Image: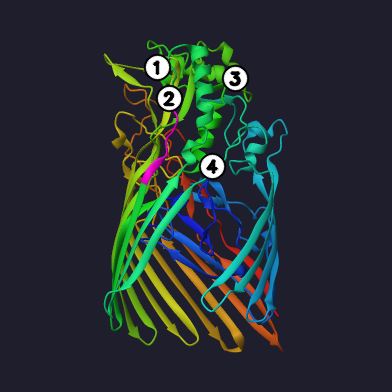
């Protein structure tokens, strides 16, 4: 949201944070039927909400009341109701499809109950759900892997069991106390930490055989326990300056100590470095960024049916625990983190300036010798250690946001809105290789003890400008809405949680270009209508213009050792995305019992939405998509309200 990365958004449940700081994702499963209402704040939210430089999703859960209420529901999917997917290849420029959808089934069963414990004073609410999904993943699709008779399809799946218990107490007319406990117990079948079933078997992806140009490996104990406390403070208030003008002011102060995790391991790692290689200690302890003050201001002027609004402020993200996990595993607890790259002289121990091609071939042969196992590094001429580290003055990234707009109610259910939003991202994290120098026309390591010293620094930036328009029309039996966003997002870093690694540590502008999430045009249409006999039809149509991707090559195009990009970053565009989702429901009432049946279609028009375009010039699939979003899928469901 707001032109920022997904991990820069904040997730709140009943006003309290519900974010997994490690990845910047939602930490718990929140079932749709447990939600009373939700807020989506795309920009310029109040000081009450923080640890997000993008947008905020705040969910308010259901509560019990003086009336007992219960619901049971179920939703079901099966491959027999799905269209055959894209096969990942083209013939004469036309996409190929599988003969039928891969085996898949999903059952979602759940329910809730709520009511009074003491009328008008004490209430309860409880819910539970069971989601079971069975699917499959293709492991190896080339003849090289089929020949030995190895598995090419691996079953995969998920079982998720979220539940929630909540109590509400009316203390008095002005105060209410709520206590909520929720948990989700999840089990995945053949799913690795990288999110792919492929990694649970041998290292055999969709390529012809064991030809390796690059290798990354690590050895050492990766066991550490950490504990820290972050603290957040805010003040905010609203003033009614006149009958027409409202002013909102706020100030937030965040103290994020997550970057200090691992400081207790620095001295021991420095001692091992000095003992092994000699020289001076390399690492420093990371300090706390303690000046994160975030002012917020907003003003609203209302005259009749017209509202004009403006806002601005500073919005800090959070330093995700993932930063320190990589630092601890790859460096502080590591006995040897190694990177080989046949095309990079600084990462090829076989490299000789007189024969670059032969040097690359020698490393490829070395890596293939023990494939797919860890190479015997003792046979390499030299194996300098690679170090991942944090800048000792690492800051928390933030955005400076400004917005302004108006809303007009034309009466008879019609409203129009228009807003302009600007956001500058600052201090975004990016890895920079600090172990390169250029002297006398030659690139060489600054510190010959190490191959690379990758330091996470606050050198990333982004810019987002958008014009947002929206129209809503409501009448007795339905509603219709339309929104259009014209936006532009640029950055000098990729969309990953670390911001990627700078291509050229001497010139960060080489990575400047359209952001990976840049979608110039976004259109959303939605509508619902209740027909006679309690039949409701609802739908949503979405169009997004093409996302950007970069062109790459595995060959060196100039004299420096950095990877080359034949074209500017993200200079090409893939495929636009468009989907139409439809829901048809029918309500049947029997006394106090209300039963609803559902039929849902996702991507009802069976549109091709291609993704993951091959950017490598050496790929046979160059400039073609390697995957696609789902084709038409259908789901059946029921709901019973008591």
Whole-angstrom CA distance, mark 1 to mark 2, is 9 Å
Q: Which residue is mark 4?
A: 228
Q: Position of residue 327 (x, y in %)?
A: 50, 32
Secondary structure state at the residue bearing disc 2:
strand
Instruction: Give the label, 3 or 2, closer to the camera.
Output: 2
Between 160 and 63, the one lying in front of the other is 63
Whole-angstrom CA distance, mark 3 to mark 4, is 38 Å
Q: Which residue is mark 1?
A: 447
Q: Which residue is mark 2?
A: 453
Is 451 magenta? The answer is no
Q: Tell me whether circle 3 and circle 2 mark residues in contact (CB < 8 Å).
A: no
Whole-angstrom CA distance, mark 3 to mark 2, is 22 Å
Instruction: Give the label, 4 or 1, closer to the camera.
Output: 4
Whole-angstrom CA distance, mark 4 to mark 2, is 27 Å
Q: Which secondary structure class fits the magenta region best? A: loop
Residue stretch in magenta: 283-291
Q: Is residue 76 left or right of residue 515?
A: right
Q: Position of residue 444 (x, y in %)?
A: 36, 16
């Amino acid at each position: 949201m707001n032109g920022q990365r997904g991990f820069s958004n904040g997730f709140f449940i009943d006003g309290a944070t519900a974010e997994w700081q490690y990845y910047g994702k939602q930490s718990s499963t929140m079932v749709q039927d447990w939600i009373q209402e939700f807020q989506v704040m795309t920009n310029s939210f109040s000081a009450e909400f923080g640890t997000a430089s993008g947008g905020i999703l705040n969910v308010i859960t259901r509560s019990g009341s003086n009336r007992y209420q219960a619901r049971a529901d179920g939703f079901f999917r099966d491959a027999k109701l799905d269209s055959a997917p894209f096969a990942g290849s083209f013939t004469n420029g036309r996409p190929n499809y599988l003969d039928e959808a891969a085996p898949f089934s999903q059952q979602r069963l759940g329910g809730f109950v709520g009511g009074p414990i003491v009328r008008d004073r004490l209430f309860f609410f409880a819910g539970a759900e069971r989601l079971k999904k069975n699917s499959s993943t293709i492991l190896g699709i080339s003849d090289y892997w089929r020949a030995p008779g190895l598995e090419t399809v691996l079953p995969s799946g998920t079982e998720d069991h979220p539940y929630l218990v909540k109590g509400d107490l009316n203390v008095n007319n002005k105060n209410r106390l709520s206590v909520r406990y929720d948990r989700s117990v999840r089990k995945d079948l053949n799913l690795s930490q990288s999110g792919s079933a492929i990694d649970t078997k041998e290292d055999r992806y969709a390529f012809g055989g064991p030809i390796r140009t690059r290798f990354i490996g690590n050895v050492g104990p990766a066991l550490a326990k950490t504990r820290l406390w972050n603290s957040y403070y805010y003040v905010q208030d609203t003033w009614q300056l006149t009958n027409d003008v409202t002013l909102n002011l706020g100030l937030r102060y965040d103290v994020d100590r997550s970057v200090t995790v691992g400081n207790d391991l620095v001295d021991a790692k420095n001692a091992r470095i000095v003992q092994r290689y000699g020289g001076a200690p390399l690492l420093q302890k990371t300090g706390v960024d303690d000046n994160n003050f975030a002012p917020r201001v907003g003003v609203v002027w209302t005259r009749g049916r017209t509202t004009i609004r403006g806002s601005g402020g500073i919005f800090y993200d959070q330093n995700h625990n993932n930063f320190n996990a990589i630092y601890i595993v790859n460096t502080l607890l590591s006995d040897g983190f190694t990177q080989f790259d046949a095309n990079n002289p600084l990462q090829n121990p076989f490299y000789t300036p007189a024969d670059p091609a032969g040097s690359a071939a020698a490393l490829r042969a070395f890596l293939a010798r023990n494939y797919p196992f860890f190479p015997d590094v003792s046979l390499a001429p030299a194996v300098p250690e690679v170090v991942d580290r944090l800048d000792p003055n690492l800051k928390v990234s933030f955005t400076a946001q400004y917005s302004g707009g108006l809303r007009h109610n034309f009466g008879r259910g019609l409203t129009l809105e228009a807003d302009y939003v600007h956001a500058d991202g600052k201090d975004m994290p990016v890895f920079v290789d600090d172990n390169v120098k250029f002297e006398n026309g030659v690139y060489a390591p600054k510190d010959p003890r190490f191959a690379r010293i990758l330091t996470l620094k606050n050198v990333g930036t982004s810019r987002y400008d958008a014009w947002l328009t929206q129209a809503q029309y409501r009448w007795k039996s339905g509603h219709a809405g339309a929104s259009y966003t014209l936006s532009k997002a640029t950055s000098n870093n990729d969309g990953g949680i670390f911001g990627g690694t700078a291509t050229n540590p001497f010139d960060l502008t080489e990575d400047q270009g359209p952001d990976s999430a840049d979608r110039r045009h976004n259109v959303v249409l939605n509508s619902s209508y209740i027909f006679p006999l309690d039949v409701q039809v609802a739908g949503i149509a979405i169009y997004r213009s093409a996302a950007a991707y970069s062109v790459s090559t595995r060959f060196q195009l100039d004299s420096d050792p950095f990877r080359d990009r034949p074209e500017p970053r993200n200079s090409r565009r893939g495929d636009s995305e468009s989907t139409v989702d439809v829901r048809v429901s029918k309500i049947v009432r029997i006394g106090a019992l209300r039963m609803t049946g559902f039929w849902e279609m996702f991507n009802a028009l069976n549109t091709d939405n291609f993704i993951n375009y091959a950017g490598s010039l050496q790929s046979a699939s160059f400039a073609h998509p390697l995957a696609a979003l789902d084709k038409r899928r259908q789901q059946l469901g029921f709901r019973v309200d008591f």
